[in-house]
Amino acid sequence: MVVHNFINPFNFIPMQKTLFIVLILTALFSCKKERVVVSGHLIDEATGKTVNPYPNAKVRLVFDQSYGYTEEVGTSEIDENGFYSIKARTKKVGVEARLQLYVDDSGHNNIDRHITLKNIVGYDFMLP
């Protein structure tokens, strides 16, 4: 009598499903968002003092996307002392971002700076 060792391939399906679910959950939780804080002042270049000559100015933290689009991560108004603070959560810590001082629609006084985003970043805008 000949005995064949036949392994049923369908016995492995529950293990494959379990492995797939574990891999998906690992991928989801490894991509958690980190808290970032970007803060600073507007500083008059001539005097070295903090100022806010723009009552409606804002600072935006953005990532460049393709085709000229941006992804806004956070924004902050600037207080009367020239201080701003952006608190946000993102997965993109350690990459280049843009910090934009937005003064008005004309764009004449707006300032755009590239920064490397970390968990805590301090950046002062020097105003001419």
Image (cartoon, grey):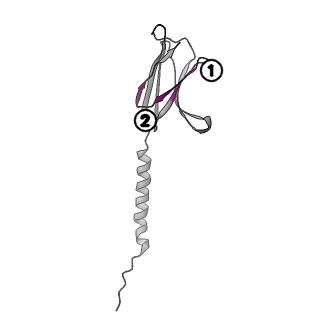
Give the residue at mark 1. 107
2 and 64: which is toward the camera: 64
Image quadrant for the N terminus?
A: bottom left
Q: Position of residue 88 (x, y in %)?
A: 47, 31
Q: Which residues are magenta?
A: 98-124
Disc 2 marks which amino acid?
Gly
Label 1 Cα crowd, 10 Å radius (few <14 / some 14-19 / many 20+): few
Give the residue at mark 2. 94
Distance in Å between CA atoms under marks 2 and 1: 28 Å
Dividing the picture into quadrants, the one containing residue 71 is top right
Instruction: Give the vertical position of 92 relative to 76 (above or below).
Output: below
8 and 112: which is toward the camera: 112
Instruction: Report whether 91 appears left or right of 1.
Output: right
Query: Does 110 appear in magenta?
Result: yes
Mark 2 or mark 1, earlier in chain: 2
Instruction: Give the vertical position of 51 relative to 84 (above or below).
Output: above
Disc 1 marks which amino acid?
Gly
Instruction: Give the vertical position of 55 relative to 12 (above or below).
Output: above
The residue sitting at 40% across, 55% down in the picture is: 22
The residue sitting at 40% across, 59% down in the picture is: 19
Query: Does 20 appear in magenta?
Result: no
Q: Position of residue 76 (x, y in %)?
A: 51, 23
Q: Position of residue 81 (x, y in %)?
A: 47, 12
86 and 109: which is toward the camera: 109
Dividing the picture into quadrants, the one containing residue 116 is top left
Instruction: Give the vertical position of 71 relative to 82 (above or below).
Output: below
Q: Dot 1 lies on which element?
A: loop
Q: Dot 2 lies on which element?
A: loop
Q: Position of residue 79 (x, y in %)?
A: 50, 15
**Which mark, by number, is residue 2?**
none
Label 2 Cα crowd, 10 Å radius (few <14 / some 14-19 / many 20+): few
